[in-house]
């Protein structure tokens, strides 16, 4: 359905307002990244997903064996493994040509082969890749094609080929193909693992290719969808009607708990980011989506408030308050608008006074950190215009040059559920300060929409106003008369992306449970390998001074009973207790045991002083500490670094998934 220019009136009004307020002396020149040498793009991508060792080995001129490639892809789905394999193949081909330009290689005479059923054979490591599954540790292969049909993939292999490692893993070739037929040829000293083999795993089930792997969602209106059609769910309940036609979803609760992005440690989020890039690349490849990286040729300030990168602002602000996660100036502008301007008619749409805004910016630059700014004198539309200027002038945009076009390309995916999955993955890929700032902005925009009855700003209005401010309207558009069809399409697409970001905020900041499962599996396999290495060191009588494998001393024998955990609360009066789990116990139930409920702190009988008893122990009520509103149970160690647990987490289920974890009661201000 074609989108008319008139239906995007707010977008074009904002567009022309931005163009009219631009300073000609600060014209932004935007261009694509310079063309990178062959293979460097693949090498950079492999490093971003944590495969630095693979890149170094290929660049050193060494191929990967079948077993090494299986180890690399052991915790990946078939689609993720295919993504890795394609880039490893491309990088290996490029490096071989670069290193042996003057030599003839038999692998250049016999290019690689793609079998009839779409399975790839022959690559660095030439691991089996059937269309429905991959072989890895704890994995099986499937003979069916994922989603029921063969995805369109860009084939870089041709008929009659050999692997980069110089061996073949296919046992037969198509009778229609020409050339030399090779049957099960393997180098001496290696073995061939059957396609259906399964290696032993840990306490987690193996990674497999499910139809839906990202979210557990369900439509809010189940009468219009068949059961099981969608698995991503967000319930808006009685939220205001804003006239948008986006479906309502409800997040289905996972027995292991819903994990928000702020719940995981920085180490875990780094690992999740690599997995998110793998999954996003696989999704975009399957939908034939490509995007370029933008690069702005502009000087970057390292001081001041406007035109300064978010990371630089945050580093400066943390010298004042080490706990902040977003720039203080951005937080203060948002806080002022939320407190005084939400019901102002046309907020965000009506432009402020250019002269007043310029004066306000100067005062902020000069006196903001001294606290000499009086926000009471700032007019609502001036504050809103200042907020939009702050976003537009970021030298590194909020959605980053690396992924801003990928956000826009999400609109080309047809299914709404897959669009949400792609947006969630992209948000995971943002740097922490960009992700946190975007979350605060979207939460603010939700509040603006919630007052639409007073401010006349619906979800559609707010989205069209904010889209050109977030997606960096190119200045050269104004050189052309009229609006081109492509620009209308871009306006509609980016407005719709902003609309989804606002409405589905709570879903999009949830870490998909499948990625957490993959991370746990990766950690378990890494621990198994370390254990095997330690056994070899002992066998060779080499002293291992590492503290990694030393078991903690046994203090409480009862803690080692099946289904019993010891919970530590170092900052509370009741600092430790053993708890026997049952099938109905949740993380919230455990936290409740550390609260001052049911008269846990009782008056001391027969005593005239102010001391009271806590489980038979006399204590000063002024020095006791109990779990409060923002107190949560944390899962620490085992197959994860650290995770703040949702109060509804089923503890027996989590105990079986991570039996070696420690359990700690702490305060969290992020939930």
Image (cartoon, rainbow, N blue to C red):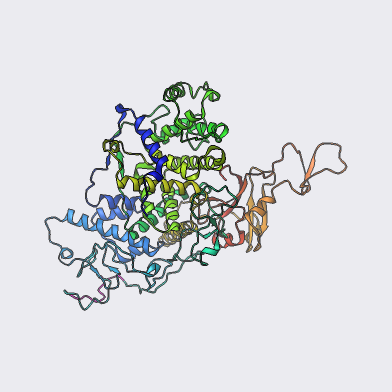
Does the image show residue 271?
no
The image quarter containing residue 630 is top right
Does the image show residue 436?
yes
Comparing 646 with 544, the one in front is: 646
Q: Which residues are magenta?
A: 180-190
In this rendering, is residue 81 above or below 470? below
> In this image, 326 relative to 79: left or right?
right
Q: Position of residue 610 (x, y in %)?
A: 81, 37
Q: Position of residue 451 (x, y in %)?
A: 56, 40
Q: Identify the residue at image location x=34%, y=33%.
A: 19
Q: Quadrant of the N terminus?
A: bottom left
User: Residue 499: within the magenta?
Assistant: no
The single residue placed furthest to the left in the displayed view is 102
In this rendering, is residue 515 above or below 20? below
> In this image, 117 relative to 261: left or right?
left
Q: Position of residue 550 (x, y in %)?
A: 52, 54
Q: Position of residue 453 (x, y in %)?
A: 56, 41
Q: Identify the residue at image location x=39%, y=66%.
A: 136
Q: Main secondary structure of the magenta part?
A: loop
The image quarter containing residue 335 is top right
């Amino acid at each position: 359905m074609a989108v008319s220019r008139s239906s995007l009136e707010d977008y074009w009004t904002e567009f022309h307002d931005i163009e009219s307020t631009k300073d000609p002396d600060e014209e932004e020149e935007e261009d694509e990244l310079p063309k990178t040498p062959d293979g460097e793009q693949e090498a950079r991508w492999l490093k971003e997903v944590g495969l630095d060792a693979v890149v170094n080995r290929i660049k050193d001129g060494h191929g990967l064996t079948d077993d090494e490639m299986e180890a690399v892809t052991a915790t990946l789905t078939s689609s993720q493994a295919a993504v890795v394999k394609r880039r490893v193949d491309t990088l290996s081909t490029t490096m071989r040509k670069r290193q042996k330009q003057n030599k003839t290689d038999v692998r250049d005479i016999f290019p690689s082969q793609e079998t009839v059923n779409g399975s790839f054979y022959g690559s660095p490591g030439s691991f089996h890749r059937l269309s429905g599954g991959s072989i890895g540790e704890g994995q099986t292969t499937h003979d069916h094609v994922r989603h029921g049909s063969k995805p369109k993939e860009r084939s870089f292999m041709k008929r009659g080929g050999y692997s980069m490692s110089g061996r073949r893993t296919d046992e037969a070739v198509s009778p229609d193909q020409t050339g030399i037929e090779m049957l099960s040829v393997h180098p001496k000293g290696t073995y061939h693992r059957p396609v259906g083999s399964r290696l032993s795993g840990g306490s987690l089930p193996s990674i497999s290719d499910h139809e839906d792997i990202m979210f557990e969602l369900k439509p809010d209106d189940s009468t219009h969808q068949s059961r099981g059609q969608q698995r991503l769910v967000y319930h808006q309940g009685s939220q205001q009607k804003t006239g948008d036609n986006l479906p309502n979803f409800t997040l289905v609760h996972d027995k292991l708990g819903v994990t928000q992005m702020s719940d995981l440690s920085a180490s875990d989020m780094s690992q999740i980011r690599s997995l998110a890039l793998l999954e996003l690349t696989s999704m975009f490849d399957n939908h034939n989506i490509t995007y370029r990286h933008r690069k702005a040729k502009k000087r970057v300030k390292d001081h001041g408030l406007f035109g300064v990168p978010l990371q630089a602002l945050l580093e400066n602000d943390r010298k004042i308050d080490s706990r902040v996660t977003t720039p203080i100036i951005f937080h203060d502008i948002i806080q002022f608008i939320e407190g005084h301007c939400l019901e102002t008619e046309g907020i965000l749409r009506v432009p402020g006074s250019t002269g007043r805004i310029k004066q306000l910016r100067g005062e902020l630059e000069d006196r903001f950190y001294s606290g000499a700014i009086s926000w009471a004198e700032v007019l609502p539309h001036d504050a809103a215009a200042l907020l939009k200027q702050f976003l537009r002038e970021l030298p590194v945009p909020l959605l980053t040059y690396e992924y801003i076009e990928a956000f826009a390309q999400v609109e080309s995916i047809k299914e709404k559920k897959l669009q949400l999955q792609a947006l969630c993955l992209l948000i995971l890929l943002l740097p922490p300060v960009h992700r946190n700032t975007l979350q605060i902005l979207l939460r603010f925009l939700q509040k603006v929409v919630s007052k639409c009855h007073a401010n006349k700003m619906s979800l559609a209005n707010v989205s069209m106003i904010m889209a050109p401010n977030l997606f960096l309207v190119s200045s050269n558009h104004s050189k052309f008369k009229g609006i081109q069809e492509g620009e209308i399409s871009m306006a509609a697409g980016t407005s719709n992306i902003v609309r989804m970001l606002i409405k589905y905020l709570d879903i999009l900041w949830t870490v998909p449970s499948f990625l957490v499962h993959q991370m746990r599996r990766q950690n378990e396999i890494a621990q198994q390998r370390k254990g095997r290495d330690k056994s070899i060191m002992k066998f060779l009588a080499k002293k291992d001074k590492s503290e990694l494998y030393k078991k903690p001393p046994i203090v409480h024998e009862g803690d080692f009973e099946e289904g019993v955990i010891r919970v530590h609360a170092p900052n509370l009066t009741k600092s430790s207790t053993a708890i026997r789990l049952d099938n109905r116990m949740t993380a919230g139930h455990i936290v409740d045991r550390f609260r001052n409920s049911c008269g846990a702190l009782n008056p001391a009988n027969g005593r005239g002083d102010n001391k009271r008893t806590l489980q038979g122990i006399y204590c000063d009520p002024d020095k006791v500490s109990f779990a409060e509103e923002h107190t949560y149970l944390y899962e620490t160690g085992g197959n994860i670094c650290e995770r703040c647990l949702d109060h509804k987490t089923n503890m027996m289920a989590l105990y079986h998934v991570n039996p070696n974890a420690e359990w700690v009661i702490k305060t969290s201000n992020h939930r």
